[in-house]
Image (cartoon, rainbow, N blue to C red):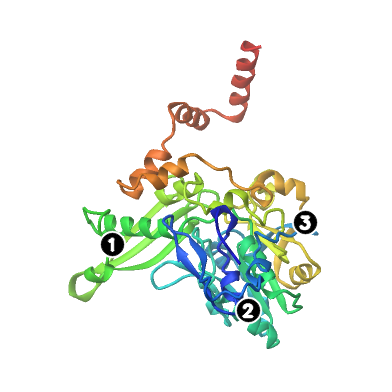
Amino acid sequence: MIRITNKSDCCGCNGCVQCCPESCITMYEDGEGFLYPEVDESACVDCGLCERVCPVVRQSAERKPMAVYAAKGGNEEIRLQSSSGGVFTALAEEVIKEGGVVFGARFDESWEVTHDYTETVEGLSAFRGSKYVQSRIESSFRQTERFLKAGRKVLFSGTPCQIAGLGRFLRKEYGNLLTVDIICHGVPSPGVWREYLREETARLLGEKNTFSSLLDLNDRDARVESISFRDKRLGWKRFSFSLTLSVPGKRGARNTLSLSEPLDKNIFMRGFLSNLYLRPSCYACPAKSLKSGSDITIGDFWGIQNIIPEIDDDKGVSLAMVNTIKGEAYHRKILLSSRSVGYEEALRYNGPIERSVRPTRKRESFYSDTEVTLGKRIERLCRLSYGQRSKRVVSGILGKRARRFIKRIWLLRNV
């Protein structure tokens, strides 16, 4: 029976809920905004299946990829809509062309993140682009199993722990399943995302009280039109968070209210990148080092400007790691511009492949200080010290050679 005594022992993959033969496990949301399983012990028959499918309890061995590529998809428009190089869409289109089904994360009608599937190329647009919120898996594992047993090809994409959970849930290899996971920094709280969205939309609408009441956009005939965590208008490396609202205008028209902020200015992204509200399991991820069992792992190829500078146009390059023979077969099928890269070279600039994020003591302060707005909490906890601000100013003014010279002088003076 699953008993969560330490919250870092649950990644929230929902596998235990979907496999339970007595349907006696449900997910509840805790005070941090994450979902955890809860067992109705009166209905439990102690079959132990929930523990056997848990990717935290039963972790796989670490792996190395068979091959590593720097890759771009062939469609420039899709690449600009994607977080990095558009490799996911190229893989997904191939599976759909073969009569298959693609699972991925999308926004629902409330702009929360959920897992869903599509059988059309047009439906893939909802899955493109990173969503820095943990998605609700709900019944996606069961749906995947039904498609597989019916003989359909399936591409299932998700975080490494979700892919590991799917593999444990299925309990057998399927030749018609292609699994694709991402290089994951960690998953932020859905509860914090709701709080941020409420405060930000209230601010855009000119609401003074952004803390005590839940914003109901319908009362103002306002609606969220789009959200992007990875807007590339300022470039791939300096991506922006963007949000667009529409509100009633004159003569039946609708006016647009927009927010666009670089990642280092947007409050939600600053808190995310400071690890303030990641799921507890992310600080000791059970699926790092390709333990998820995925066929292909994709992500941003950070550091590409230092490895293959001639292909870096600041529109996005994917790091694609092929982990299985099946993954390699699909990599050969799709139309990509790709260059082979050494694993250690890629790992040098993309540490999250193997390393979990470091715990921060500020996380406890973030969740305990609930008497002020989310924005004020993040601003206070992410505020740079005087030394950090000075270093940033100097780094912006001086070139690399000047910084190396100053460092050398400092070392000589302190010998």
Which mark sits nearer the N-terminus, 3 or 1?
3
Residue corresponding to mark 3: 63
Classed neighbour count for the residue bearing mark 2: other residues with Cα under 10 Å, few (<14), some (14–19), many (≥20): many
- The mark found on residue 195 in the picture is none
Label 3 residue SS: loop
Quarter of the image with the N terminus in it: bottom right
Find the residue positioned furthest to the left. Answer: 251
Which mark sits nearer the N-terminus, 2 or 1?
2
Residue corresponding to mark 2: 144
Estimate the spatial distance between the alpha carbons at disc 2 and disc 1, rounded to whole Å.
35 Å
Q: Is residue 22 above or below residue 74?
A: below
Q: Position of residue 69 (x, y in %)?
A: 73, 57
Estimate the spatial distance between the alpha carbons at disc 3 and disc 1, rounded to whole Å.
46 Å
The residue positioned 47% from the left and 58% from the top of the image is: 229
Q: Position of residue 185 (x, y in %)?
A: 58, 52
Label 1 residue SS: loop
Residue corresponding to mark 1: 214
Q: Are marks 2 and 1 in contact (CB under 8 Å)?
A: no
Quadrant hosting residue 400: top right
Q: Are marks 3 and 1 in contact (CB under 8 Å)?
A: no
Q: Position of residue 303 (x, y in %)?
A: 65, 46
Position of residue 222 in the picture relative to residue 360 (left or right): left
Three-letter code, disc 2:
Thr
Label 2 residue SS: helix
The residue positioned 44% from the left and 34% from the top of the image is: 384
Quadrant hosting residue 207: bottom left
The residue positioned 76% from the left and 62% from the top of the image is: 323
Q: Is residue 295 above or below residue 183?
A: below
Q: Is residue 198 visible?
A: yes
Three-letter code, disc 3:
Arg
